[in-house]
Amino acid sequence: MYMQQLIDKLGREKISQDKKVLIQHSKDESIHTAALPDVVCFPESAEDVAEILKIASESLVPVTPFGAGSGLEGQAIPVHKGIVMNFERMNKVIDFSPEDMRVTVQAGVTRLQLNEQVNASGLMFSVDPGADAMIGGMVATNASGTTAVRYGAMRDQLLNLEVVLADGRIIKTGTLAKKSSSGYNLTGLFTGSEGTLGIITEITLKLHGIPEYNMMARCTFDSLECCTRAAQNMLQAGIPVLRMELIDAVSISMINRHSGENFPVKHSLFFEFAGSERAVKEEVELASELMHNHGCENWIAANDTVKMKQIWKARKDLNYAIACQEGIKEIGGDVCVPISLIPELVSFARTRMDASGLNGAIWGHVGDGNFHTSIMYNSSVEGEFETAEQTNDAIVLKAIEAGGTCTGEHGVGLGKMKFQKAEHGAALEIMKQTKRMYDPKGILNPGKIFMDE
Ligand SMILES: Cc1cc2nc3c(=O)[nH]c(=O)nc-3n(C[C@H](O)[C@H](O)[C@H](O)COP(=O)(O)OP(=O)(O)OC[C@H]3O[C@@H](n4cnc5c(N)ncnc54)[C@H](O)[C@@H]3O)c2cc1C
């Protein structure tokens, strides 16, 4: 019945039940089990989205928005089947105002497409989660990445959202003004809501100037304590690093084994600096002095492209070292704690991983206190998945106990639902009430964030 209504309202060309298309929309980049939707819709406007939601609401059909499918927590998997909404046809830049350093895009524009369009005007969109995610998906997960230490996460880039509610109403959550004290912060509420409160159709973003000069640097430390103290000191000294990443010593040896490299097997910090040439050179000099005061070794810095690539190679190779092991899967962790607690949490994670007998890598956006763990297991070896899961749970609960969060950037989806009570306590019930208010029939991405909704 609802299928015919979708065809009548949207036309056949905007919906697909092709097996290949259904399979493509049954999974994301996580380890969570795929689930086939019944149909995939390709809306071309907010009005199309509103029509789909009105039909779904009337027939009580689940609707799961789907961005680029690069999520790591199963957020876009249609676990209760129904309709998946794909935004690839909503890929237009609607309004670009270089003078105001502002752009309004449809939800299906990807971050690389956006940068291609605005870079020629000397401007850039700063959030870089690695994958070429859609802006709608990035808002829905409050994505960040290596540049958040300087520019903040997705939430910090937003001026306004256009959102279609579960009953088909279309609302705006903000204005074009750079700041506002007016009304509740609905923009903030929809950011990170993973498609469970409304469908984001348009996003107005702040842009940043492209720095004229870049340099990269790397150094190593014998102790994790010195390594993170040095990182902390870098921020306290007001040096505006563009990126500041940590990789622990065990993970460096894993990279060496995989890539045949010979990086010093020590706790390592990787930096990128960006700005005017004079300022960057001064910052790098100051950073070198600071790092040496904290006992660093193997300091190297460069600004030519080849050398910069070499410096960043270990950081880049880590992903391949993890992904390219045949038959091996990973449980990925994404905890975030105050930066002063990083040594304690990283040591705890390393001890638990080593005690589990499984391989594990640790790296992180140390400036934000956000670090990733990859606990690797062979799914055909009995008990390995359970051991990996227990190890991951222990690390996450320790981070929450320390006042941190189970996820700094990847989101909750299916993987982090079980930690919501421990992290939010009584506030979890308020979140559930909010969900019921926005989505009383429970059609929007059901089965995510809350265990029992
Ligand atoms: C190699 C790799 C590295 C990564 N590194 C990082 C990283 O450093 N930092 C980081 O933050 N993330 C990282 N990620 C995760 C991922 O890229 C982000 O979570 C990204 O924001 C997801 O965007 P997407 O378009 O792929 O959304 P999807 O995965 O398709 O969907 C994510 C969620 O958003 C919802 N959604 C999608 N579009 C809309 C919409 N228009 N309205 C409402 N809800 C919507 C979906 O329902 C789902 O709940 C990485 C992923 C990979 C594969």
Image (tube, grey):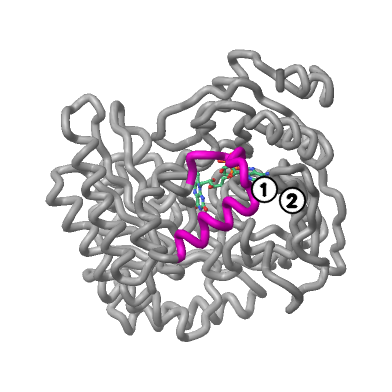
* Label 1 neighbour load within 10 Å: few <14, some 14-19, many 20+: many
Element marked by disc 2: strand
Label at residue 163: 2
Outermost residue, top direction?
19
> Would you place residue 200 above or below residue 293 in this image?
above
Mark 1 sits near ligand 1, with its Cβ under 8 Å away: yes
What is the C-alpha distance between the residues marked 2 and 1? 6 Å
Q: In the image, what residue type sits under mark 2? A: Val
Specify the segment rendered in magenta. 427-448
> Would you place residue 240 above or below residue 112 in this image?
below
- The reply to whether residue 117 is visible in this rendering is no
Residue found 19% across the figure and 41% down from its top:
387
Residue 358, position in %: x, y? 19, 42
Mark 2 sits near ligand 1, with its Cβ under 8 Å away: yes
Q: Nearer the viewer, residue 75 or 292?
A: 75
Residue 310, position in %: x, y? 45, 53
